[in-house]
Image (tube, grey):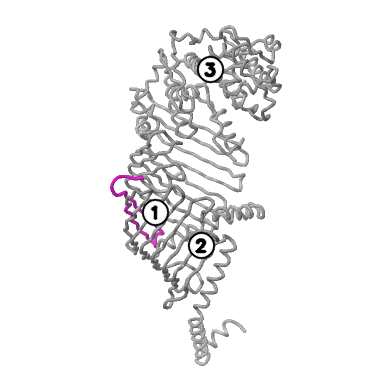
């Protein structure tokens, strides 16, 4: 029996009548048992969620209202032996006939009465931590049982469903009364309240009231959804004085405030294996504060970005048409991540040719304080190409390119870098505590000019710290690549790839916080000093050797030489100079380099030999000096009283890498 035959039979009058009878019976049966079907599906889903998450979902009543509207009364979710996570007094969802037939949840209209979401933050009593923990366990189980291709497919499918649900849910009409989100723990309380929320084809316009530890403020939120163009647009305006957004300060130590924030999301393609999204955002009067960024409020007058994003089974991409805007200065960015190619990450940023002053005017207030008010002439054009296979951190490719034309400093701002050429005083701080003031001049009895320091000290430190110091412009790309590689391996900001010039700038002008903004300010100052020849190499090294820490409360080369060897820097021997160089990275841990009998530990011989070989290759020492090198030193100054029985401490109290100044690749230069 063919399909064509069945269709012909149905077309006949008698069979068509039977067909209508059958359809009518099915519809009547469905209406009679539909609430039972909904209850069975609901109970099945709730059981599954309970098994996966330990989350109990209940409703006093659930079923159909009319032909295509689902409803639930007193819908609640409560983790086992925890406080209620959310509750809704009454919820109604109207579905399309097609979605209803195929059992898809793609709402056309939603009514929510008294929805409440309640997060309890105490770890031992949290009612939401379990979701993150269980999700992590399942991901680990998946990763151990499926291959990379399957895992990538799962991520792709998850992203597709998430984006699809955003546009599916946001294009529905919403009628929400008395929404309340609350977060509480032992020392913090925050609530977000929306008395009434109505959305339609014309969008929505509502007011959000935020309560945080007794303080309150309002955010006006407007939005528009365009289903035909798959577009969602949001506009948020702080009402009255700016206040920090809730939770971020408490949970992340990050205070975020703004006057106006705009966000627009457009889905250009939305297929399971091909997603293209345009994400555009702009902000006015943005204030940020985090101790990890700066000790001051960071202020951005205006900023934004436009990201053209592509997601498919082969790669994740932010296209080169994407731009970022910081206080009017724009740059194009490109980012590509290929999970199947050893997790290859490619990044590119280009500014194009811009007026140099535009860069310095764009620097946010609260950051780059040493450059505030600086005036420059000329143009700059910056480009950075970077790629690495994350599974092979040593595969880093990094090429920065900065082109200038007629660039010069017309006027210094808050910091006059040329003052380094004159005598000045420098305050020393340790962990925020003032230690002492060092005067860089002859009135300081411990100050030593460049010519008063033994050449072997200078050569040993340059070899260890920055082999290309006298030839580079303050940067060492190979050392920086090595540092990035080590940071990736350790999954933290552990190494900075600093040259002597960078270390000097950090000591003179910057704090010791390890973050990208401080590093960026360091790079800018180093570039200015190097490109403009503001300070000679000899003067920089002279300052550096007179201010760096060399032991517990020991600062400068003169104090160091007397502390360790009770002699003037002019009289230090080669082996003593190499030892002094080895102390610089961890000056307070020098005692761990020695055995209890006062001899250097055995691994130091390899360190001495490594540095000495480089000094020999560079013509800093003779063959005779190299062969006569004594791979040990005897402390004759006050430091000998600090030696302790290191056998009482674990072997890794200080690692060989720490002693060797992180072994920057400058050591490998010929």
Q: Mark 2 highlights which residue?
A: 78
Foreground residue among 638 and 390: 638
Disc number for residue 554: 3
Q: In this view, does 611 lie to the left or right of 451?
A: right
Q: Give the range drawn in magenta.
A: 219-243
Look at the picture and state if 44 lies above or below 660: below
Q: Mark 1 highlights which residue?
A: 191
Q: Is residue 539 left or right of residue 387?
A: left
What secondary structure prevails in the magenta region? strand
Rendered image quadrant of residue 379: top left
Marks 2 and 3 sit apart, C-alpha to C-alpha, by: 60 Å
Work out which residue is located at the far bottom of the displayed protein and give it.
14
Residue 184 x %, y %: 44, 52
Residue 62 x %, y %: 47, 73
Total numbered circles: 3
Residue 128 x %, y %: 51, 55
User: Which image quarter holds the N terminus?
Assistant: bottom right
The mark nearer the N terminus, 2 or 3, is 2
Q: Is residue 212 left or right of residue 147?
A: left
Q: Are marks 2 and 3 in contact (CB under 8 Å)?
A: no
Element assignment for label 1: strand
Q: Is residue 564 left or right of residue 268?
A: right
Look at the picture and state if 402 lies above or below 617: below
The mark nearer the N terminus, 1 or 2, is 2
Q: Is residue 410 visible?
A: no
Marks 1 and 3 sit apart, C-alpha to C-alpha, by: 52 Å
Rendered image quadrant of residue 404: top left
Marks 1 and 2 sit apart, C-alpha to C-alpha, by: 19 Å
- Mark 1 surroundings: few (<14), some (14-19) or many (≥20) residues within 10 A: many
- Mark 2 surroundings: few (<14), some (14-19) or many (≥20) residues within 10 A: some
Work out which residue is located at the far front of the displayed protein and give it.
186
Q: Residue 240: say if magenta.
A: yes
């Amino acid at each position: 029996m063919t399909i064509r035959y069945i269709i012909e039979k149905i077309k006949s009058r008698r069979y068509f009548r039977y067909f209508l009878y059958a359809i009518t019976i099915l519809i009547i049966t469905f209406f009679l048992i539909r609430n039972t079907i909904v209850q069975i599906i609901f109970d099945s889903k709730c059981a599954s969620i309970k098994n996966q998450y330990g989350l109990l979902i209940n409703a006093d009543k659930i079923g159909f209202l009319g032909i295509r509207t689902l409803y639930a009364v007193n819908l609640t979710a409560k983790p086992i032996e925890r406080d209620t996570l959310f509750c809704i007094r009454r919820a109604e969802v109207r579905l399309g006939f097609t979605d209803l037939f195929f059992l898809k949840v793609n709402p056309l209209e939603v009514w929510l009465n008294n929805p409440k979401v309640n997060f309890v933050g105490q770890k031992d009593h949290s009612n939401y931590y379990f979701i993150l923990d269980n999700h992590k366990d399942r991901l680990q189980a998946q990763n151990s049982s499926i291959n990379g291709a399957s895992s990538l497919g799962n991520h792709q499918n998850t992203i597709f469903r998430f984006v699809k649900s955003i546009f599916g849910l946001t294009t529905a009409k919403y009628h929400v009364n008395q929404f309340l989100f609350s977060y509480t723990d032992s020392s913090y309380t925050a609530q977000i309240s929306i008395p009434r929320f109505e959305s339609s084809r014309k969008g929505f316009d509502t007011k959000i009231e935020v309560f945080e530890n007794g303080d309150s403020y309002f955010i006006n939120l407007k939005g528009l959804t365009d289903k035909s163009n798959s577009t969602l647009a949001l506009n948020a305006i702080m009402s009255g004085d700016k206040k920090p957004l809730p939770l971020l300060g408490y949970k992340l130590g990050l205070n975020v405030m703004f006057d106006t924030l705009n966000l627009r999301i457009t889905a250009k393609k939305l297929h399971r294996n091909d997603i293209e999204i345009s994400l555009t955002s702009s902000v006015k009067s943005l204030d940020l504060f985090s101790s990890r960024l700066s000790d001051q409020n960071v202020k951005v007058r205006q900023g934004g970005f436009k990201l053209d994003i592509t997601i498919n089974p082969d790669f994740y991409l932010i296209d080169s048409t994407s731009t970022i805007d910081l206080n009017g200065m724009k740059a194009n960015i490109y980012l590509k991540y290929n999970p199947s190619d050893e997790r290859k990450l490619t990044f590119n940023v280009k500014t194009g040719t811009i007026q140099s002053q535009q860069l310095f005017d764009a620097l946010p207030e609260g950051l780059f304080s040493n450059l505030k008010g600086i005036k420059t002439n000329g143009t700059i054009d910056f480009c950075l190409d970077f790629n690495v296979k994350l599974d092979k951190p040593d595969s880093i490719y990094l090429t920065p390119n900065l082109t200038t034309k007629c660039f010069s400093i017309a006027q210094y701002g808050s910091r006059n870098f040329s003052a380094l050429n004159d005598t000045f005083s420098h305050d020393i701080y340790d962990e925020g505590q003032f230690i002492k003031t060092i005067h860089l001049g002859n009135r300081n009895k411990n100050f030593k000019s460049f010519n008063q320091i033994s050449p072997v000290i200078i050569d040993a430190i340059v070899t260890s710290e920055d082999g290309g110091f006298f030839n580079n412009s303050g940067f060492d790309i190979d050392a920086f690549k090595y540092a990035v590689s080590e940071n990736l391996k350790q999954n933290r900001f552990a190494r900075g790839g600093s040259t002597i010039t960078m270390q000097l700038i950090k000591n003179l002008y910057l704090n010791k916080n390890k973050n990208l903004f401080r590093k960026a300010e360091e790079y800018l100052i180093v570039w200015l000093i190097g490109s403009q020849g503001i300070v000679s190499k000899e003067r920089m090294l002279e300052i550096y050797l007179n201010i760096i820490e060399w032991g517990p409360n020991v600062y400068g080369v003169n104090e160091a030489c007397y502390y360790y060897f009770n002699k003037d820097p002019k009289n230090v021997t080669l082996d003593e100079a190499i030892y002094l160089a080895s102390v610089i990275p961890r000056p307070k841990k020098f005692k761990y380099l020695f055995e209890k009998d006062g001899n250097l530990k055995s691994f130091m011989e390899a360190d001495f030999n490594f540095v000495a070989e480089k000094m020999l290759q560079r013509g800093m020492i003779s063959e005779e000096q190299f062969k006569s090198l004594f791979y040990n030193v005897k402390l004759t100054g006050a430091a000998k009283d600090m030696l302790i029985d290191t056998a009482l401490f674990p072997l890794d109290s200080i690692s060989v890498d720490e002693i060797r100044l992180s072994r920057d690749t400058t050591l490998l230069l010929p």
